[in-house]
Image (tube, rainbow, N blue to C red):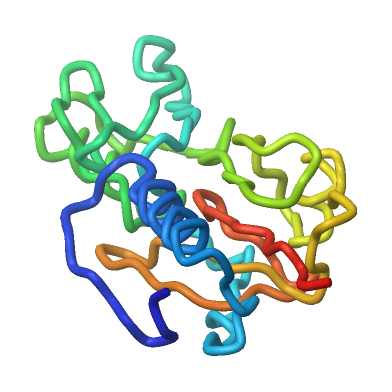
Amino acid sequence: MPRHGQRRRHPIAARPALASLGLAATLCVSLGACTPGTDLHEVPSYDPHSYVLGVDDQIRVITYDQDQLSTDFRVDAGGKVAVPTLGNLQAAGLTTAEFAAEMTQALEKQKLLRHPSVVVEIVAYRPVSILGEVARPGEYPYRPGMTLLTAIAASGGYTYRAFEGYAYVVRQEGDHTVTGRLSPGDFVKPGDAIQVYERHF
């Protein structure tokens, strides 16, 4: 199982964390027993107010007095958003305010609008994947302020075999992946892949 601090560089892609988590779970099964996370450290804390856009986020762009440029978009696997008349604009890695500024600059550069006013908001975040010892493993919608405990509740709660002290998480940070331990009160980040361990009887 990856130790804290290990990072794998790769292009931004949809749900890379889920594939890594599946590999970790497979290794635990093949070995017959994994000591629940004793070799892991806490992942760096996540501040929901510092969120940047990522693959599969759905956003709403509002361009005042320009209905044709006001619509919903999804960030594609390349981290871009296809905007009519503007082409593909980079979105992944930017805050909503930064993406609004990028779109404003593109409108001005192409002389489509004078002094455009653009606002960007998030309609739907990347889902959170929860596997292991929970009642209903799968993907669940992320909600602002979600913690590990509320994510577990969304998946039906722990099974009787679950280790409840913490969970294993695979998290995307920019263009690299980090792994580590997530405690019940820690904030979950959109796109997180979480594995709930089986406790030893």
Q: In the rendered view, does 186 fall on the left or right side of 81?
A: right
Which residue lies at the image location 79% right of the left edge and 51% below the top edge?
A: 152
Which residue lies at the image location 34% right of the left edge and 34% below the top edge?
A: 75
Q: Is residue 171 visible?
A: no
Q: In the rendered view, does 81 fall on the left or right side of 191?
A: left
Q: In the rendered view, does 92 fall on the left or right side of 195?
A: left
Q: Quadrant of residue 163?
A: bottom right
Estimate the x, y position of residue 144 in percent, counting from the top left: 71, 51
Instruction: Name the one closer to the observer, 198 or 41.
Output: 198
Estimate the x, y position of residue 195 in percent, counting from the top left: 60, 58
Which residue lies at the image location 68% right of the left edge and 59% below the top edge?
A: 196
Residue lying furthest left: 110
Instruction: Name the one closer to the observer, 64 or 154.
Output: 154
Estimate the x, y position of residue 169 in percent, counting from the top left: 55, 65
Q: In the rendered view, does 191 fall on the left or right side of 112?
A: right
Picture layout, residue 38 above or below residue 157: below
Q: Is residue 96 visible?
A: yes
Estimate the x, y position of residue 185 in percent, counting from the top left: 81, 72
Picture layout, residue 85 above or below residue 18: above
Picture layout, residue 140 above or below residue 70: below
Q: Quadrant of the N terminus?
A: bottom left
Which residue lies at the image location 57% right of the left edge and 44% below the top edge?
A: 129
Q: Quadrant of the C terminus?
A: bottom right
Q: Quadrant of residue 4?
A: bottom left
Q: How many marks?
A: 0
Instruction: Name the one closer to the observer, 20 or 72.
Output: 20
Residue lying furthest top: 68
Instruction: Name the one closer to the observer, 15 or 187.
Output: 15
Residue lying furthest front: 32
